[in-house]
Image (cartoon, grey):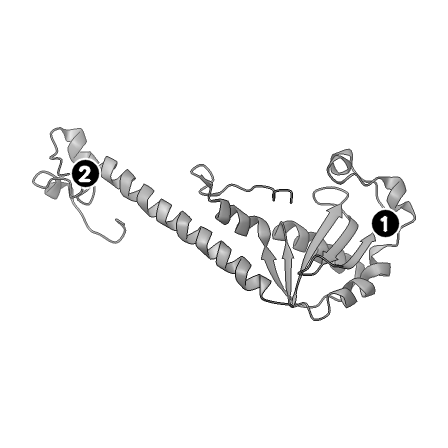
């Protein structure tokens, strides 16, 4: 609101606040009057602008979801791993109707951390006899044929893990558009964090 405007302290001696009409009474008031507005009015304007932005972002998130559901060329992907930066232990892909396009446990050939096991419940014994990522890769890619858009809950995590694993194994990857559901849902919820200067992330509700 105030960016791009020029202002000087000399104007503050004669000007009142353009928002509330308050006249500077003390040196602090004079210093506080920036570009014709006192700090209280600046804060109020910032809050109004933020509220408007939150509303627009929420509407945009709803519009994104509505547009996505009109498409038939997207799939929802979920991965489980040995750790936050570890190897893949499970891959699941579903279509718009929730039909399973692909699902497999994956032998990571390394141990699963206790922290990861507490999240997804997959044990080392369960994946010991599972195929490795290169062994399931072709079937996984076939399940994604015709799917131009991949939706994941945490795009940075899932895409990063998958592409890193594919590079390490020398697997061929196809180019697709990735959408991050956690960020869209955060905008839909609209819980702004002044500390992070972004929306707080929330898990999806159980249906």
**Residue 60: which numbered mark, if any?**
none
Q: Nearer the viewer, residue 66 or 40?
A: 66
Q: Is residue 53 above or below residue 137?
A: above
Indicate the position of residue 179 as horizontal and vertical percent values: 59, 58
- Name the mark nearer the viewer: 1 or 2: 1
Residue at horizontal 65 percent and vertical 49 percent from the top: 157
Residue at horizontal 21 percent and vertical 35 percent from the top: 32
Q: Earlier in the sequence, mark 1 or mark 2?
A: 2
**Residue 33: which numbered mark, if any?**
2
Q: What is the secondary structure assignment of the residue under circle 2?
A: loop
Indicate the position of residue 162 as horizontal and vertical percent values: 72, 55
The answer to which image quadrant residue 117 occupies is top right
Indicate the position of residue 138 as horizontal and vertical percent values: 82, 65
The answer to which image quadrant residue 98 occupies is bottom right
Indicate the position of residue 5 as horizontal and vertical percent values: 22, 52
Q: Which residue is mark 1?
A: 107
Question: From this viewpoint, which residue is outermost toward the left?
Answer: 14
Instruction: Tell me whether the residue at label 1 lies in contact with that at label 2, contact meaning CB atoms closer than 8 angstroms.
Output: no
């Amino acid at each position: 609101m105030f960016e791009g405007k020029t202002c000087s302290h000399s104007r503050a001696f004669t000007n009142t606040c353009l928002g509330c009409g308050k006249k500077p009474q003390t040196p602090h008031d004079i210093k506080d009057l920036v570009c014709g507005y006192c700090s209280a009015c600046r804060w109020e304007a910032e809050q109004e602008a933020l509220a408007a932005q939150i509303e627009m972002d929420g509407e945009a998130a709803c519009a994104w979801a509505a547009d996505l559901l009109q498409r038939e060329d997207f799939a929802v992907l979920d991965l489980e791993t040995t750790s936050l930066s570890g190897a893949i232990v499970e891959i699941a892909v579903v279509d718009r109707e929730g039909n399973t396009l692909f699902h497999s446990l994956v032998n990571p050939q390394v141990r699963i951390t206790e922290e990861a096991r507490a999240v997804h419940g997959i044990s080392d014994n369960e994946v010991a006899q599972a195929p490795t990522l290169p062994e399931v890769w072709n079937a996984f890619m076939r399940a994604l044929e015709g799917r131009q858009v991949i939706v994941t809950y945490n795009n940075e995590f899932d895409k990063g893990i998958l592409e890193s694993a594919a590079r390490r194994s020398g697997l061929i990857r196809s180019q697709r558009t990735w959408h991050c559901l956690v960020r869209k849902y955060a905008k839909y919820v609209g819980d702004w964090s002044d500390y992070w200067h972004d929306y707080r992330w929330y898990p999806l509700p159980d249906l």
